[in-house]
Amino acid sequence: MKIRNILNIGVTVFGAVALISCNNSRDYSSSSRATGWDLSGKRGGLEYKTDYESKEPAPGLVFVEGGTFTMGRVQDDVMHDWNNSPTQQHVQSFYMDETEVTNLMYLEYLNYLKQVYPPSEERYANIYRGALPDTLVWRNPLGFLENMVNNYLRHPAYQNYPVVGVNWIQATEFSKWRTDRVNEKIAADEGYVARDAYRNATAESNFTTDTYLNAPSKVYGGDEEMIKGKTTEKKIQRKEKQNSKNPNDDSQEPSNIYVQKKDGVFYPEYRLPTEAEWEYAAVAQTSVRDYNSYKGRKKYPWDGEYTRSSKRKTLGDQKANFKQGVGDYGGIAGWSDDGADITTEVKSYEPNDYGLYDMAGNVAEWVADVYRPRVDVEFNDFNYYRGNVYTKNAIGKDGKVEILGADDVVYDTLSDGKIIARNLPGEIKKVGIDEEETYLRTNFSRSNNKDFRDGDKASSRYFKQAGSNNSDEKMYNSPEHEVTASNGKLERKYDESNSRTTLIDDSVRVYKGGSWRDRAYWLDPAQRRYFPQDMATDYIGFRNAMSKTGSKTFKGRKTRN
């Protein structure tokens, strides 16, 4: 019996030790979980960031935790648009600008373009001119708004007011520029490029994030003094030291001296938010954890069913800047309802529960989506977005990415004849996805997906109507204005056809939120309208968003790979 008890105890102890061993995961903080190889780079092997921590939000942005919500109209459709029926959607976590992009922020962009691409040089003239906001949007045939035409963009009194007169294309180009400037400064501060490189850029010597990650030796026009910072120099010295110790050992593969995506140094791109993201952020349903809120019964970005404050100190004050009635844009003098008549300075009103300001009123805002009268929840209910155009880096005959030179600026002539630069020197040339990437794929089959499943029987861009002999008739019979060049001048041809039946096409974009010109009906985040992407107004601005990498939340921020 004693021997049997001893054996039982031994088995029990052994099992407990084995169980503890199984529950205690091995530490793979600096080695590969797949092979056990060293990933720290200390022994000349692969260097990988195994102790990555989620970065703080990029400049200007606040965190919006993703989740599910009811996207679309939950109030009466008094306009009878029938374009925003309620659908259940899930949005991934992301970041969003706490305010609209201001005049001062946009002026920084214009000043950069003016310095790097002087408009006095003919080959660059349209880069700066194409980025200028249209200040004439303020003009009214029966109104006196010359003060706004002449002063709104540049006068310091308006520097913290939201920029207007910017079309959708200009907003997207600003977003690209902002991405590169933020990441360039990070590269300089971290010592990966010269300390003041971002202050000395020229058309022939500039920085783009995409180019640096794919062909780092080509940024700044290949100028080594600007490309190499203190951290880069240390990596070079380390590489030379490794090579001197083992000159004949080819297995000693030194760490890359440039920043790579695996290092997690740079931020993802600034961009326009999708319609789903914008609406989700505006609703900010986190404050009300009840069934009605979850099902989309929240009417405004704030709690409650009214536009006026119910707080004791601010009782009766308007919570947003909007038009309250015919001829009433700001209330009675000395007793102003909303404190503004046109736009007003950002942060003039309380933020919503995500910390976002002016998600209702002040200016309406561009979002990324191409407009269609319906949201196709049957096909996708996760991170919905209409407008995907898949592209890839152009690869030259030498097998390397093609970098645009100083004379390779790609321009886009808009329907009104305005010329806008879409690709600048130093950027990587992009081409559409072809059959090599789409063959036998089940998730997508073409590069341009703006009109995917947009309502026609064949779910294609062109279809044949009953009784029509034209097999290439468009689904949306919208006007087609033409701009042609003749004798060095642009000739604009306005489409005067009487057979047009709609204004919807692949070049109209959604804009969300009410503005200083709108009545309270449009303050509902669910409301959606559209406007041509190459036109601007005095009541549409924009703000940027950024995708969050990694986990959905910041709980347990430290992520071990």
Image (cartoon, helix red, strand yellow):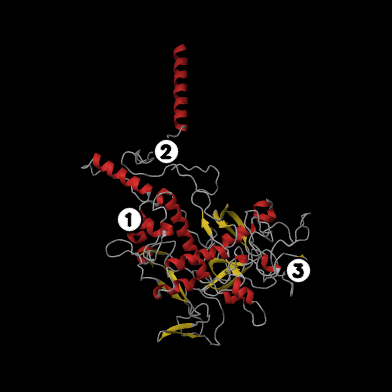
Mark 1: secondary structure? helix
In 3D space, how far apart are the residues under numbered discs 2 and 3 (Cα atoms)? Answer: 62 Å
Q: Residues within 10 Å of mark 1 (few under 14, many from 20)?
A: some
Residue situated in front as seen by the camera: 180 or 150: 150
* Extreme-left residue of the structure: 248
Quadrant where the C terminus is found in the figure = top left
Residue situated in front as seen by the camera: 503 or 216: 216
Q: Position of residue 281 (x, y in %)?
A: 60, 58
Q: Earlier in the sequence, mark 2 or mark 1?
A: 2
**Where, by quadrant of the figure, is residue 138 drawn?**
bottom right
- CB-based contact (under 8 Å), mark 2 and mark 1: no
Residue 316 showing in the rendered view: yes
In 3D space, how far apart are the residues under numbered discs 2 and 1 (Cα atoms)? Answer: 34 Å
Amino acid identity at mark 3: Gly
Mark 3: secondary structure? strand
Q: Which mark is residue 22?
A: none
Q: Is residue 255 left or right of residue 183?
A: left
Q: Which residue is mark 1?
A: 224
Q: Is residue 208 left or right of residue 503?
A: left
Q: Earlier in the sequence, mark 1 or mark 3?
A: 1
Q: Residues within 10 Å of mark 3 (few under 14, many from 20)?
A: some
Q: Is residue 16 left or right of residue 228?
A: right
Mark 2 or 1: in front is 1
Vertical side of 264 occupied by 275: above or below: below
* Extreme-top residue of the structure: 2
Q: Which residue is mark 2?
A: 29
Q: Position of residue 229 (x, y in %)?
A: 37, 50
Amino acid identity at mark 2: Ser
Q: Which residue is mark 3?
A: 331
Q: Residues within 10 Å of mark 2 (few under 14, many from 20)?
A: some
- CB-based contact (under 8 Å), mark 2 and mark 3: no
